[in-house]
């Protein structure tokens, strides 16, 4: 099955759970000064585009991370010419071994 990729508003419980887990993991495995991950409110910035990948057609009817959310990516539209312009992303650990992610 091909995942459905769509622009997201960060309100779905599965999206919020995966972002929270991503932040928890970053702080657990990196020195605090090396963590540059954004929280949910900062990911809602108008300068960012936030996209999610879902396994299945009814993305709003299945509220669990394991059921259908494969991952997310946030891309910045602002670039000052200094530093790098890298997307931020995270993959659902339960979907990493599937052919979808």
Image: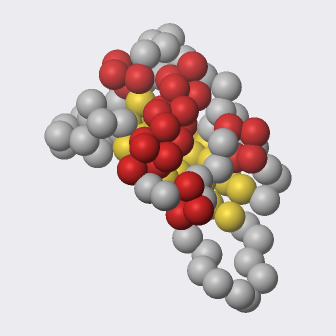
Place residue 92 in its image quadrant.
Answer: top left
- Residue 35 visible here: no
Residue furthest out toward the bottom: 81
Residue 84 to residue 6: above or below? below
Q: Tell me what residue is drawn at x 58 percent, y 28 percent.
A: 16
51 or 25: nearer the viewer:
25
Residue 85, image x, y percentages: 61, 75
Q: How many badges with numbers are in the image? A: 0
Residue 98 falls left or right of residue 76: left
Q: Is residue 62 above or below residue 81?
A: above
Q: Residue at position x 66%, y 42% from top?
A: 39
Which sits in the foreground, 1 or 76? 76
Image quadrant containing the C terminus: top left
Q: Position of residue 20 (x, y in %)?
A: 54, 33
For the residue pair 71 and 36, the one nearer the viewer reads as 36
- The answer to whether residue 67 is left or right of residue 82 is left
At x 60%, y 80%, the residue is 84
Q: Which colouring convention does the figure follow? A: secondary structure
Q: Residue 31: x percent and y percent?
A: 49, 58
Query: Which quadrant of the figure contains the N terminus?
Result: top left
Query: Can the viewer see residue 11 in this picture?
Result: yes
Query: On the picture, is 29 further left or further right than 17?
Result: left
Residue beneath the point at 34% across and 19% down: 67
The quadrant holding residue 48 is: bottom right
């Amino acid at each position: 099955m091909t995942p459905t990729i769509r622009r997201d508003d960060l309100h779905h419980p599965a999206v919020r759970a995966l972002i929270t887990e991503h932040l928890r993991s970053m702080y657990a495995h990196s020195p605090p000064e090396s963590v540059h991950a954004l929280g949910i409110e900062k990911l809602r910035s108008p300068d960012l585009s936030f996209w999610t990948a879902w396994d299945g057609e009814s993305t709003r009817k299945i509220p669990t991370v394991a059921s259908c959310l494969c991952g997310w990516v946030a891309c910045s539209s602002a670039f000052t010419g200094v530093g790098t312009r890298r997307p931020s992303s995270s993959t659902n650990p339960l979907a990493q071994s599937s052919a979808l992610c």
